[in-house]
Image (spheres, rainbow, N blue to C red):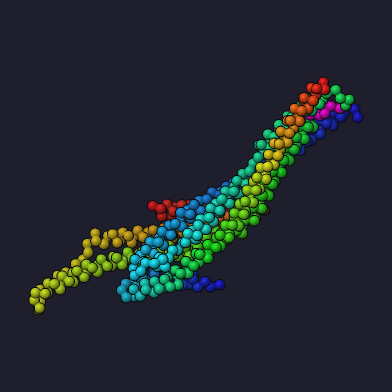
Amino acid sequence: MEPAKTNDAKYSLALLLTAGAALLVSISCSSTSKMAKPLSDFSAATSEITTVTTSALPMVQAADQDEVVLKASQGTSLKEKDIPEFFRPNDLLQRQLTLQALSTYAATLKALSGVDRSADIQKSFDSLKTSIDSTVTTINKLNTDSKTQLPSGVVSGLVSLGSSLVIAYASAERDKAIRTALEKSDSTVTKICRLLAAELERHGVIYDQLEYAYQKQEESASDSFQATVQSFNASGDSETKDTSKPSATPEPNATPKPRATPKPSDLAPYVKTFLGLRNKKEYSLALLGSLASSYRKLAQAHTALKLQSETGAKSDIQLRALSSEIDNVKFLYSQVSK
Amino acid sequence: MADPYFYLSEIADSLWDFYQDTDGKVSDQARSMYDTLENVYLEPFRRSQVQADTQRYAQLTANLQADITSINADIQRINKIADDVQKVAQYAAIFDQVTAVAAKLLL
């Protein structure tokens, strides 16, 4: 083969390799995962819900303890069985650990979708190219018997193609890992979310216990209010009786003394307590209900993300619904923690 | 399947509303029935149910922790691809230096 023709062939090969590398970059080497944004949104939502739930559970425990104190104060003995706790230490701990695991899981998925070492890989290949070019130049300088010089263009093309292939491989591995993780964990995440929602929604055990705790406290405030009213009535009656003492037969024209009525300032504290309890009850129960709804939507969003990773179907609707519910949770939590 | 707890809770809610919306003897009766229903049936059930759920949470958390470990292993594996390429580049640089020294000796 003539040297000119050989050089043309080498040049064409180098061009082909470089074009192939460029094509790979454009069609398959998108270094940012398509799942990065939805998984980032999912992680932020999960973090917010679990943080509020972590704060809400001790709130339930505190309300329950207030109710237990009221109940135990009416008893005749004080033993451990008289003051049962709704959340034992392990009950609260396991729920907190589950919430923490859920948040960590979402954050780890986000981290996986954000794994992007394409710049590092490109840098390494650039360095590799420099080294190989330098080695080729050194070898070409040597007085060998070979009539054909080592072509640096082909080497550059091969290195570019190698770089693109490795970046594409890393991206494909990352997307496969995301798909596998979402598929594998979907059942567990759904079960956790359903369990939390079942406990936090109306007629769930935590919701009902909180409602009961506040209702018992309302009863107590109502009883205190009535006792104060009755004590005033009783003192009014006794005063009426006292005035009839001096004469056994009261004078026919004598006007009976009016019953003593409590002043507003005597009753206002009880009304305030009752009102405070009622407001706290309403907002706390609304918060638990909203959290329950959030967990149901979190499970739906996770399943939608799983489908997105498999088929490319969008998860925007589920993520938006979740975000909207979180706005409710934030508002209600701000009212409860006032 | 019918859930007895759900229906008993509905009855308890109705009794509470009745207690709130009426006065006198009827109100006292509704309150007494509400207290009995809560103290005897509903509250003990809730306490035992919370403890039963705790076992399920423990199991599910263990499963999720295993999944997190698996995802972290994937992150490390994918990062290792870039690390391996970097090593190849380093070896190539060393090879180039060796070749340069060898060439100087030959020339």
A149 inside magenta stretch: yes
What are the residue bounds of the magenta stretch? A147-152
**Left of A87 or right of it: where is A314?**
right
Q: Residue furthest bottom?
A: A249
**Left of A128 or right of it: where is A108?**
left
**Left of A208 or right of it: where is A12?**
right
Magenta span: predominant SS is: loop
Q: Which of B96 and B10 lies nearest the eye of the viewer?
A: B96
**Residue at 64% across, 41% down:** A116
- The image quadrant that residue A188 belongs to is bottom right
A258 inside magenta stretch: no
Q: Can residue A58 be seen at all in this image of the molecule?
A: yes
Q: Residue furthest top?
A: B107
- The image quadrant that residue A157 belongs to is top right
Q: Which of B86 and A307 lies nearest the eye of the viewer?
A: B86
**Residue at 51% across, 53% down:** A50
Q: Is residue A310 above or below residue A68?
A: above
The image shows residue A325 at horizontal and vertical percentages of 50, 55
Q: Can residue A308 be seen at all in this image of the molecule?
A: no
**Residue at 55% across, 51% down:** A103
The image shows residue A2 at horizontal and vertical percentages of 90, 27
Q: Which of A111 and A288 lies nearest the eye of the viewer?
A: A111
The image shows residue B39 at horizontal and vertical percentages of 41, 71
**Residue at 68% across, 49% down:** A176
Q: Is residue A320 above or below residue A146?
A: below
